Image (tube, rainbow, N blue to C red):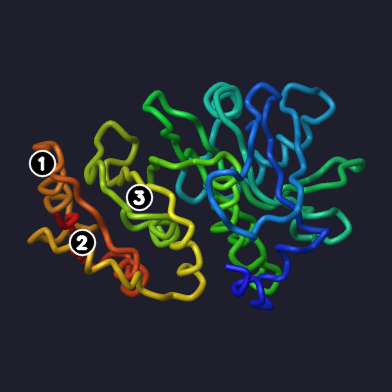
């Protein structure tokens, strides 16, 4: 993967002015971070912030401002108490922070850091442990890229924020929630084989919600940047014999019925999702053998 870091657009990964951070209470810190996956992407030591300290609340305020701005259009900003009760206490937040001296005026306006704050969070990924053995839940992911002019965006910031968190916490199995026609689907499918757990989810505020599960595979990560097809996908998966239409509720319900019947695990192809419009029909796959 070191070859990938030669990409000029990814040179920021080695910058002393843009470092990974982990916002976590001391009891939740990972004892052996980065032990499960071999990658040389994250060489910088993370900045640790403690959410139980009053003098570090400004960092939380910035995270919440970033999240609120990012999810305002979808009407799904996270209440402050949910952030503390459901994210911070059981899990952690990770992402990248920019040194104040390198932050643009637009970033400062969005994050509104205190005058004394040195590091500003420009991305966030909330990861929460589940009761299932070695399983985690992806709660939220966003970056400042969607809020600033394109020339100020940091290439791959959102994708790499989630990758860093998975690497840091040695997350082998991750479940997550997103909406079928959200651009985030293209990002989430590039961390490992993408299994669908629900296709139609009426218990959620938005019934057209997709629940997924994936097993972390760092070999997939580089394909987010190279746009390559997994060369072994067709060797490992075959079409299930039907498609799903993200904009047709009946199609989503039909797929959900198949999922609820049990006995078969269904997957999507990251390369297909990336190469076509978000509202296009998708081939559903099953694992061979």
Tell me the residue at 54%/58% (across/down): 159
Residue highlighted by disc 1 = 257
Q: Secondary structure at mark 1?
A: helix
Is residue 137 shown above or below 147?
Answer: above
Would you say the residues marked 1 and 3 are in contact, meaning their CB atoms lie under 8 Å apart? no
Is residue 17 shown above or below 36?
Answer: below
Label 3 Cα neighbours within 10 Å, binned few <14 / some 14-19 / many ≥20: some
The foreground one among 271 and 84 is 271
Q: Where, quadrant-wise, is the N terminus in this rendering? A: bottom right
Residue highlighted by disc 2 = 237
Q: Where, quadrant-wise, is the C terminus in this rendering? A: bottom left
The numbered mark at residue 101 is: none
Tell me the residue at 58%/23% (across/down): 81
Q: Secondary structure at mark 2?
A: strand
Tell me the residue at 67%/55% (across/down): 42
- Mark 2–mark 1 distance (CA, rounded to whole Å): 21 Å
Label 1 Cα neighbours within 10 Å, binned few <14 / some 14-19 / many ≥20: some
Going from the N terminus, do you reach mark 2 or mark 1 first? 2
- Mark 1–mark 3 distance (CA, rounded to whole Å): 18 Å
Q: Secondary structure at mark 3?
A: strand
Is residue 133 shown above or below 110?
Answer: above
- Mark 2–mark 3 distance (CA, rounded to whole Å): 24 Å
Horizontal placement of 81 versus 182: left or right?
Answer: right
Residue highlighted by disc 3 = 179
Q: Position of residue 285 (x, y in %)?
A: 18, 59
Pair 2/1: label in front: 2
Going from the N terminus, do you reach mark 2 or mark 3 first? 3
Going from the N terminus, do you reach mark 1 or mark 3 first? 3
Horizontal placement of 267 versus 224: left or right?
Answer: left
Q: Hey, which quadrant is residue 275 in on the image?
A: bottom left
Horizontal placement of 234 versus 138: left or right?
Answer: left
The foreground one among 40 and 132 is 40
């Amino acid at each position: 993967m070191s070859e990938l870091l030669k990409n000029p657009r990814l040179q920021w990964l080695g910058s002393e002015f843009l470092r990974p951070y982990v916002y976590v209470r001391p009891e939740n810190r990972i004892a052996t971070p980065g032990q499960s996956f071999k990658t040389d992407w994250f060489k910088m030591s993370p900045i640790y912030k403690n959410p139980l300290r009053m003098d570090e609340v400004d960092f939380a305020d910035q995270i919440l401002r970033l999240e609120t701005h990012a999810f305002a259009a979808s009407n799904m900003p996270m209440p402050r108490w949910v952030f503390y009760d459901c994210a911070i206490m059981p899990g952690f937040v990770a992402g990248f922070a920019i040194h104040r001296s390198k932050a643009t005026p637009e970033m400062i306006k969005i994050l509104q850091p205190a005058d004394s704050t040195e590091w500003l969070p420009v991305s966030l990924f909330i990861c929460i442990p589940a009761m299932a053995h070695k399983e985690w839940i992806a709660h939220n992911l966003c970056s400042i890229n969607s809020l600033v002019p394109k020339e100020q965006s940091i290439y791959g910031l959102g994708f790499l924020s989630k990758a860093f968190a998975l690497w840091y916490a040695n997350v082998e199995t991750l479940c997550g929630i997103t909406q079928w026609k959200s651009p985030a689907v293209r990002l989430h499918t590039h961390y490992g084989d993408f299994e669908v757990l629900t296709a139609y989810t009426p218990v959620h505020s938005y019934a057209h919600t997709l629940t997924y599960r994936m097993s972390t595979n760092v070999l997939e990560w580089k394909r987010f940047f190279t746009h390559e097809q997994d060369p072994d996908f067709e060797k490992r998966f075959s079409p299930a014999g039907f498609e799903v239409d993200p904009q047709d509720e009946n199609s989503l319900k039909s797929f959900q019925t198949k999922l609820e019947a049990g006995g078969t695990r269904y997957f999507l192809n990251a390369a297909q999702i990336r190469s076509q419009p978000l509202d296009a029909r998708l081939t559903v796959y099953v694992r061979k053998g």
